[in-house]
Amino acid sequence: MSFSSQIQAVAYCRTPYKQKFGIPRQPGLVNAARGFVELQAPYNDIDTVRGLEQYSHLWLVFCFHENLAQGWKTTVRPPRLGGNEKLGVFATRSTFRPNGLGQSVVKLHKIHRRKGYLALEISGMDLLDGTPIIDIKPYIPFSDSIPDALGGIAHEAPKLTKVEFSQDAKQQLACYEGLEQYQQLEELIIGVLAQDPRPAYKRAKADPKVYQVALYDLDILWRVVKVAHAKNNDSVSEDTIIVQEIKTGISV
Ligand code: SAM
């Protein structure tokens, strides 16, 4: 059998996520992330989305364009398993896959239309800014949602880590939050960092490193501290993420 196809982007996604590190590992985990699916000619005709406003959610089929050069792997080490165990590529949502295609359900907020411009305002995406969108389809709850489905290694949403802001970061946040381009900035930062984007092996021990994630054109600098507290007569330590600094100027 043979098959050939020339796949083109129908749109590009604009998101606050300017680097791969820190992007949630699935959609719907950080709903404060707002973005736009900007349709490209000839798909930017309003008729291509006629009727789409009746749906609350969309499937985006997209290309992991930043990873294409690295090809695919037969097996991968899912971050959920601490990077220690291998699973087959088709048993995971790894970005290193044949054809480099991903799929995500996102919330549709609004369809924006101006002369020559057609864009879908969305939230909850797990996509890098500039991701090529290969196809857009409505999410159909009766068929696409299977509440009793088995979720394998990803049965539940990841546990969230507590996020706090230093005094400096609180002041910086207050300056940026008033600006229109930084929508729901505090919720976005908390949502992203609460996922603890570090590699899983970093969680076991004290980790003095200062990390950086890029959201919009801001660098967010943060570190993790272990905070001890009493639980059932034992002392347990839990991670808290401290946002140290928020500054303009992406360093990626
Ligand atoms: N929900 C999709 C799926 O299951 O096909 C994507 C899951 S994948 C594990 C999500 C990760 O892909 C993000 O955390 C980010 O690091 C990475 N990613 C997002 N957009 C990308 C792009 N355009 N190129 C390469 N990697 C990307």
Image: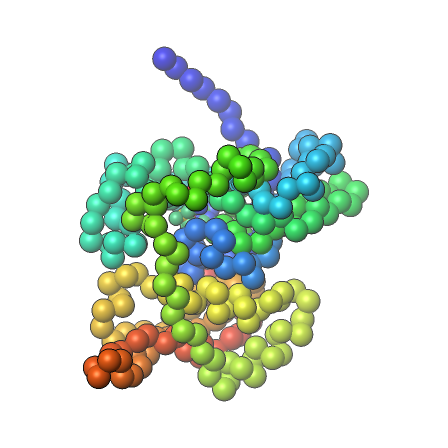
66 or 180, nearer to the observer? 180
Q: Position of 74 compared to 33: left or right?
A: left
Task: Tell how many labels.
Answer: 0
Residue sticking out furthest to the bottom: 167
Work out whether residue 161 can be spotted.
yes
Of residues 26 and 118, which is closer to you in this image?
26
Residue at (73% x, 43% y) in the render: 117
205 over 93 or under it: above or below: below
Residue 153 drawn above or below residue 39 = below
> Which part of the image, by quadrant, shows the N terminus?
top left
- Farthest top residue? 1
- Residue 55 in picture, x, y percent from top left: 64, 42
Of residues 40 and 174, which is closer to you in this image? 174
Residue 233 falls in image quadrant? bottom left
Residue at x 79% of width, y 42% of height: 115
Tell me: residue 158, above or below residue 65.
below
Q: Specify whether 24 is left or right of 49.
A: left
Q: Indicate the position of residue 81 as horizontal and vertical percent values.
A: 25, 54
**Looking at the rendering, which quadrant does residue 123 occupy?**
bottom right
Residue at (41%, 53%) from the top-left corner? 25
Q: How is the image coloured?
A: rainbow
Picture coordinates of residue 72, whole percent (x, y)? 32, 38
Q: Please give left or right for residue 38 compared with residue 225 in the image.
A: right
Quick check: 242 above or below 38? Answer: below
Q: In which quarter of the image is residue 152?
A: top left
Q: Looking at the image, can residue 45 be seen? A: no
User: Which residue is at a point 62% across and 73% down the rendered structure image?
Assistant: 177
